[in-house]
Amino acid sequence: MAELRDLYQRIRNAVCQSTVITEQLRMYNLDAGVREYQSFLKDFQAIVGELLGDDGTLAAMGVGAAPDYIVEMMRGLLGAQEQKDYVLLADLIALQIQPFLQGLLEQLQSAETGGLLPDHTGKNLAALSERDPALAKRLGGLDDSGIFNDRDGSAQEAWRDLFVEETSVGYPTCRVERDGESFYLHSNQDPFAEARAWVRALPDEQATGYHVLGCGLGYHVLALYEELRECYPVHVYEADLRMMKLALRFVNMEKALRSGLLIFHEDVQWRALSEAVARSGQKLCIHYPTLRLMKDDRLRQGFEQFFLQDSSYRNAKMLLQGNFDANMESMRVQPQRFMTADVLRGHFLDKTVTIVAAGPSLDKNVSQLSACAGRQDGILIACGTVFRKLLGLGIRPDYVLVTDANPRVLSQIYEQEKNDVPMLMLSTANHGFAARYQAVHYMLFQEGYPRAEQEAAARGCMCVKTGGSVMTTALDTMIRLGAKRLVFVGLDLAFTDNLAHASGTSNRVATDTKDLTAVKAWDGGTVYADQKFILYRTWMERRLQEQDAAAVDVINATEGGSYIQGMRHIPLAEAMSL
């Protein structure tokens, strides 16, 4: 059994190495790829040696391959290596070597030998005890023997919702069954490859420490530690000691734990994590599947909102940077047409501001907005999505607000490029708005984007909180500009009547209630919202609890959609009579 376990370990390590090699060589990171290949080749030759030297034991279990095929693979590898053809080398490893190795793993897994997964608990706990003996002692006393006894129903009650399953690369994943749902914490194909993909975009030149929410089985935290090249500490926070114990059992983290740069924290209420990331230079890294394990809905929603904003920023980093640079150039070249929104403070002070969103309920009362346009005692703002709809109805807003970075939103100004309605514009909004739309632009610099914060500080102007959407941005901006009353229209934040948007605005996609959440409706009934809408609503509710919002009368005159705590819910006609 020990020999089979060693072979199994060697093969799965070789599979993991082969994935790293192909990743590096296909990025033309030849130094890293070749070094990994040299290490891999030793393991692969040892595996091949065991197969070719088999005394019949492996063959009897159905484990092995034709000697001629093995020799052919070796010739291909050595030939590509000799010719320094790294494109071919990566292809051979991905298309030939990896399937061969995974086939061997499957043969070993199906041989019913059992106990092939190595147990790293002892050495990991020994390393952990050097830094945190109390935590190591608690984990050492946690009996995880029941994790594999689910098939005959004899699993310990404490482990009945966790299922460890082997993958095709030999490293286990974890399936969770809870509240009638079943979901995985890691990839079923290659957990380490998934982890490396996750950490690739995480390093931040402004971060001096990294704090990970959720340890899972440990793949992603070890990948982050390795990605940071032992230069910065990685703190891991976990509310469930069982997950921590499983991570120490199935993933070898001995070196990282002994370095003192991989630190585990038991954090039942996630308070330690919240306090840690509040300090300057500390980066929050969320293992998204772990959020599904959180019991506190309010806390989970807060972390989900951060995750969505952070992932959106990382995914669009170059787009944001390009838009910001182009928009700042427009401000430099044409200062008479591009200025900061701070100059409008006197214009908005003590005014009633009606803000129009594109929710489906807008169709109920949009015709009433004509009475708002041009009023001396009020201001009408349209989000970009609803701008053309209002103009088509003969309703001219005082401002149009745009925040989206993607070029697809330029359709919002199609055939309106010469319109003179002033534009409120986020500093990272698509630069096409500045280039094509000829009216005056008022720039908003946002918190959370370092370059915008730096520019705002240099100009001595305000930073706004965006909250992730155009309407959350509007709420914060108007509070900061000193509005007396805010009246929201079309702010459904829900799929009212199974619709996504008002007619003539954006995709008017019908939906059903699957995967949606029933929430309190504007009129006290029930309406369905997705997680994104819930996060935006929660953000607004929290923003309205801040001290500077107390002086603002905020009205939700949508006449449909979600109920938003902190707003008065009255019909638009009544709001217009105030």
Image (cartoon, rainbow, N blue to C red):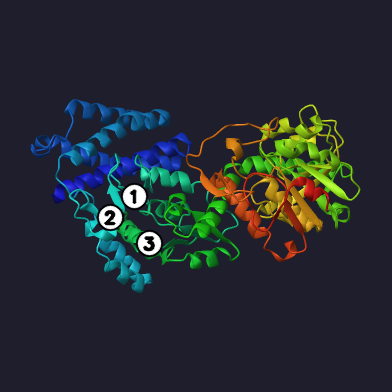
Contact? badges 2 and 1 (CB < 8 Å): yes
Q: Position of residue 301 (x, y in %)?
A: 53, 54
User: Which residue is labeled 2 in the image?
Assistant: 160
Q: Position of residue 354 (x, y in %)?
A: 79, 47
The kind of secondary structure element at disc 3 is: loop
155 or 371: which is nearer to us?
371
Task: Check the image and report above or below for 186 versus 551.
Answer: above
In primary-sequence order, the first of circles 3 and 1 is 1
Residue at the spot 43% in from the left edge and 38% down from the top edge: 23
Mark 2 lies on a secondary structure that is: loop
**Residue in the picture at 81% in, 32% down:** 391
Mark 1 highlights which residue? 177
Q: CA distance from mark 3 to mark 1?
A: 15 Å
Q: Earlier in the sequence, mark 2 or mark 1?
A: 2
Left or right: 183 as drawn, with respect to 28: left
Q: Residues within 10 Å of mark 1 (few under 14, many from 20)?
A: few
Q: Quadrant of residue 50?
A: top left
Residue that numbered label 3 is attached to: 240
Image location (x, y in percent) of residue 162: 31, 53
**Is there any visible trace of residue 231 in the rendered image?**
no
Disc 2 residue type?
Answer: Arg
